[in-house]
């Protein structure tokens, strides 16, 4: 049996986007995130965190700093088991050869293979064009969550103003 999944951008999607966030005290969940992720887990979605953190590649802070901020986010989300099934922190800068850095679909493809994910029932959710491209490159579905949605998006991409809107559409089985 294939599983459904959500691949989740971090900054500006799960938490308030702050430039090169390095202080766990600056981690603030966006409205509705916690409720929707709890419901999606209950509905059987596997959750994956997929975040570009070029500040590590630039030497501005270490991977340990990213882990501390992630841990603060996990504490605030307070998800039941299994929580996140996989986490990808892509540390390359845009100038480096991309390995996992979005829009590379590599992480999504590896997780799809490893965890038997259904591309037609799996989503990349983000706030930036690189998130959209990563999802489309991987052949999964895509939702862009922005308070003021872009006027246009590639065909099939959901434009949502907030998590409540996305959750309502997804869990109503809308398409
Ligand atoms: Mg983002």
Image (spheres, helix red, strand yellow):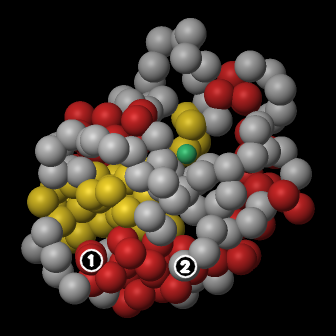
Task: Tell me if I can see residue 124 in this picture.
Answer: yes
Quarter of the image where the N terminus is located: bottom left
Task: State the residue at coordinates (57%, 62%).
Answer: 14
Q: Residues within 10 Å of mark 1 (few under 14, many from 20)?
A: some
Q: Residue at x 64, y 35 (%)?
A: 53
Q: Quadrant of ligand 1?
A: top right
Does residue 74 appear left or right of residue 64 in this picture? left
Relative to residue 26, is residue 109 drawn left or right?
left
Q: Which residue is mark 2?
A: 32
Of 47 and 115, the residue lying toward us: 47
Q: Give the labeled residue for mark 1.
A: 169
Dot 1 or dot 2, earlier in sequence? 2
The spot of residue 169 in percent (x, y) is 27, 77
Front position in the image: 88 or 165 = 165
Q: In this view of the protein, can residue 82 be seen by the observer?
A: no
Placement of 27 over or under 106, stated as above or below:
below
């Amino acid at each position: 049996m294939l599983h459904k999944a959500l691949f989740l951008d971090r900054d500006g999607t799960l938490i308030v986007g702050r430039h090169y966030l390095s202080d766990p005290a600056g981690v603030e969940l966006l409205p509705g995130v916690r409720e929707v992720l709890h419901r999606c887990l209950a509905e059987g979605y596997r959750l994956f965190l997929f975040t570009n953190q070029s500040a590590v590649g630039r030497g501005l802070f270490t991977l340990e700093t990213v882990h501390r901020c992630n841990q603060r986010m996990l504490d605030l989300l307070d998800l039941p088991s299994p929580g996140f099934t996989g986490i990808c922190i892509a540390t390359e800068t845009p100038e480096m050869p991309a390995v996992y850095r979005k829009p590379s679909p590599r992480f999504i493809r590896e997780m799809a293979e490893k965890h038997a994910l259904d591309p037609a029932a799996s989503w990349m959710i983000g706030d930036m064009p690189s998130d959209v491209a990563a999802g489309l490159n991987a052949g999964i579905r895509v939702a862009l969550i922005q308070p003021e949605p872009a006027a246009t998006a590639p065909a099939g991409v959901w434009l949502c103003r907030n998590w409540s809107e996305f959750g309502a559409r997804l869990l109503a089985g809308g398409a």
